[in-house]
Amino acid sequence: MTSAAPAREVGSGRRLTAKRTRQLVGFFYALPTLVYVICFFIIPVILVAWMSAHGCKLLTCTIPNPGQLNLPDNYSSVSGNDLFWPAVFFTIEYTVLATVLLIGMGLGLALLVQKGGRWVSVLRTSFLVPGALGLATASLLFWGVYSGAIGPFNPLMDGLNSLGTQLGLVTQTSQISFLGSPNTALLSTTVLIVWKYAGFYMIILLVGLQAIPRDVYEAASIDGASRWQTFRFITLPLLRPSIALSMILCITGSLLAFDQFYVLTKGGPDNTTVTLVQLIYREAFIRQNLGTAAAVSIIVLVALFLLNALQFRGLRGNVAD
Amino acid sequence: MRKPIRMSILAIAAVVAVVGCNSATATPTATPTATPAPATATPTPAAPGAATPTPAPTTFSAGTDDGTKLTMWTRAATQARAEPLVAAYNASHKNQVSLTIVPTDDYNTKVGTAAAANGLPDVLSGDVVFMPNWTSAGLFQDLTAKINALPFKDSIAPGAIKASTWDNKEYGLPFVMDLSVWMYNKKLFTQAGLDPNKPPTTLAEFQADATKIGKLGGNIHGTFFGGNCGGCNVFTWWPIIWADEQQVMSPDGKTSLLNGDDAKAVYKAFAQMVSDGTALMPDSKTEAGPTWTGYFPKGNIGIMPMPASLAGVANAALADSDIGVTPIAGVNGGTATFVGGDAIAITKDSKNADQAWNFISWIQSDDAQVNVIAKPASQGGLGAVVSRSDLANNKYSSSDPRLVMFNSIAAKGQTPFAVNFNAAFNDPQSPWIVLLRDAVFNNADSAKIDSDNNAITATLQGK
Amino acid sequence: METNSTLSRTPSYVLQGGLAILFLFPIIWAAVASVSPSPGSSQVFGYGLGNYKTLYDSGVGLPTWLLNSVVISVLTVTFVLAVSMMGGYAFAKFSFPGKNVLFLSTLAILMVPSATLLIPIYLLHNFARTVPIIDQIANMNLVWLALVLGMFQLPFATYMMRISFESVPREIEEAALVDGSGTFAAFRHILLPLVRPGIVTVALFAFLAAWNDFFAPLILINSSAEQPLPLALVNLRQQTMGAVDFGSTEAGVVVMSIPCLILFLLLQRYYVQGFMSGAIKG
């Protein structure tokens, strides 16, 4: 589609060479990206796909000798894995929760800081700061916050407990168990993610907010629109490209969630917080079935690629002039 | 005061004597005094002129010591013990070992990725329970002939060697050893009206003592266990089953027997403690492993199984004299222990096998065992369990009667053997955790335990 | 509508201030916890720097790990910037066969779990060591690691640079070309300064990602002397079986975070602008 049809008109010869030259120059600038992506991404992905076709075992799988061809078993056996469907459902559950909370929170914060001023820039900085930490670091930090050993909530609970005991309200002392039940484990992990990434989505959505022309608001105000009506019928629709971009990033990131659960819950309690990538990790490194791990990876890649192609079409469709 | 310990010393003496006799009858060269002839061990003995800062009672050398640089990986959990050993070797040998520490939880990942790409170091140490997985995949060089040539072969604790044997070929030796024992807080025993010199000798007594201590209330808890941790309960519960001469798996590691009578008795005892709520620290249900040994040293746990390597956990909250140790007992008495720790082997990728052998055979020598491993931490050693029964009574062990006890029970401990051990037991998503949580927290009936046990068998068979 | 009195705004200020404190609280808590007394850590009595001393003394030591982390992060930033600046320019201002396929392939990097990708990358690394010329790069482990970490940053960097270059009006580039400068001179002297906020944002993200990554160094680095900080800190945390030292864990969190926070606060202005510059396009 991008390639030019060979034009035979004599008069356009010079223009054609100029266009060719410019194509070549563009290609030259893209060359490092091309080499990089081929060497470090395309070839490894091809290798993953090739492993996914063989009964490749972690300790013995080599490039010349990947084990016997194991198609379509590697793919068809995936759904027979006890953890696969729970992992799919949990990952979707987490993705929906994280996406709704992150974009909602990001939008709320963006509305809060969209005007200038010193106070607002202090606010903006405090919302952005958690994003500067690495995910594993942040997970470790929250692991400490949630821990009974040094977490800040235990002294608090001890205080409440002793107060309650003195007042005769409490007979059994209790502690908060942040990661102890399936629901609290999911919520506690999502809180970490919202804390860390809300600022990032705030910025993306802020960019969208700033791009809305002021006169649109003025027109609405003249028409006597209420605040809610302005938000619902002007801000939200005009913000769609930013929201779409946020959703692409958020959904992709959440569907591939690993670090936060690896550090905080390790998939527990009772295997209720196992994500798809944890399943892949377990299949590859614990059960040592590189073949099926690669098969799940390829399934996830294809699903994400299709999902994002759909979303991206929506995004670019709105963005393109 | 120290009656039980004295008694165990006697027991040890007996055991050592038995072991000594056995080995003496088996091979005349392996006497407890160990006076090996280096020439028989190796065709190229080390240069006699090599400087040895700590003169060993007997000089032993095998393999080649020619100044080669060797690489070795170990997991973070054994770093504190690996570093002094490597330092002592480097100081007394021309070969130099460079040690790379790998995060404990990610060790399998690291080794697994390196194995297929021929990227393993010369020497690899690893948790003994993972050895069958690695030997069966051909990660190591066959050491059978070399090990058999060792003058003290028969006194080396059999656990690590057995775990590293595949198809009748021996691939590994012990590196550092660890055992599971019951540790109890003597102060809390006294407070609860129990005799601090009479630790439990059956599982029922353990439960009764823990319950009694739990009744003290407040911050005091009778016992604690990692209710969401597979590896913890392998290490601490299986000896209860073994103590009664029952098994946890078939010898080939393909069939799980964790629905046996004693296993069910263990689950029942802990399920009772969970539902009763008196004995058990509530955090048990969520403990996934990272902090399970951290509670006892805080001084508010009455009795719980602990790694012997942590015997010196005395701190501000818990005095050394308040720490009691006793072997893990069975449902109907008897004692047993889990011989864990790390084995050490030479990988298929090593091009310096003779030099690597010089290093790993030195670890078994009197010099390393006594002057590094047995020497108390206060004198710059490791203060750890030796892996040779003929050295159980050494010049340092008498200073800490607990060490003598550890050394003795090590000889009759067990190390489980299964190729898919990690997937079946240690992994956070393992079927073993499903079973133990069903049985202990969810009141699973006998049939449910049987079906959970079948799931373990399936994982053991790689299904 | 905009006529709220100061009085009626007070609750909203309190709410906003409370929200800001909520976001800062965990970081402040980690800093406090790292110097607070806690049993089983190196800081048992009173407040002090015992946990930091443990970090400093452990293994090959904090200075080496810090240096490794800095080298890896700086290399990663260099690779990512060089490739994404050129690539972003190409995607924004040129059309050539295969452009969309290449752009989408670059974005697809985001869609593969990194753990899966690292296994074949490791195989390739060992293969590259045996190929003449390439082995020169492959044998420099830190360089290879930075290349791998850079690859994971490429989708964001390329996207960011593309929207940054797209926001530069075509007339500016054409004026530069008419002046007689070649495309490279125009790129180098006229366009790059205009997309500086985008460049700073990409650099910041690449630095943060490289600085914090644990899994790639775990797989690719085979020597304690070459380990970066995240790997070393996990080692430290898992030293005693079943007894995590929370104190030095939190000290590690602080040591990991400080450079990130400083860089972030210094570059914050550009960071916000970097996103804004793409705003012209939406």
Image (spheres, coloured by chain):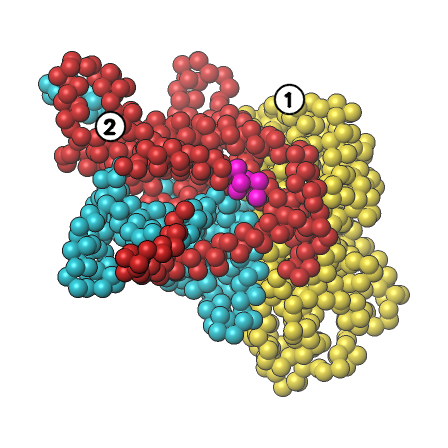
Chain colours: A red, B yellow, C cyan
Residue at image coords 69%, 34%: A80
Amino acid on which disc 1 is placed: Ser
Front in this rendered view, residue B32 or C117: C117
Residue at image coords 68%, 50%: A54
Foreground: disc 2 or disc 1: 2
Q: Chain of mark 2?
A: A
- Relative image position of residue B313 (x, y in whole percent): 55, 48
Q: Is residue B445 above or below residue C48?
A: above
The magenta stretch spans which residues?
Answer: A297-304
Q: Is residue A303 magenta?
A: yes
Question: Is the stretch drawn in magenta largely helix, strand or loop?
Answer: helix
Residue at image coords 19%, 37%: A121
Q: Distance between the Cα atoms at labels 2 and 1?
A: 51 Å
Q: Is residue B452 above or below residue B164?
A: above
User: How many residues crowd mark 1 within 10 Å: few (<14), some (14–19), many (20+)?
Assistant: some
Residue at image coords 69%, 59%: A65
Q: Which residue is mark 2?
A: A111
Q: Quadrant of the N terminus of chain C?
A: top left
Q: Which residue is mark 1?
A: B275
Front in this rendered view, residue B334 or B449: B449
Front in this rendered view, residue A211 or A88: A211
- Relative image position of residue C178 (x, y in whole percent): 16, 59
Q: Quadrant of the C terminus of chain C?
A: top left
- The answer to whether one can see residue A260 in this image is yes
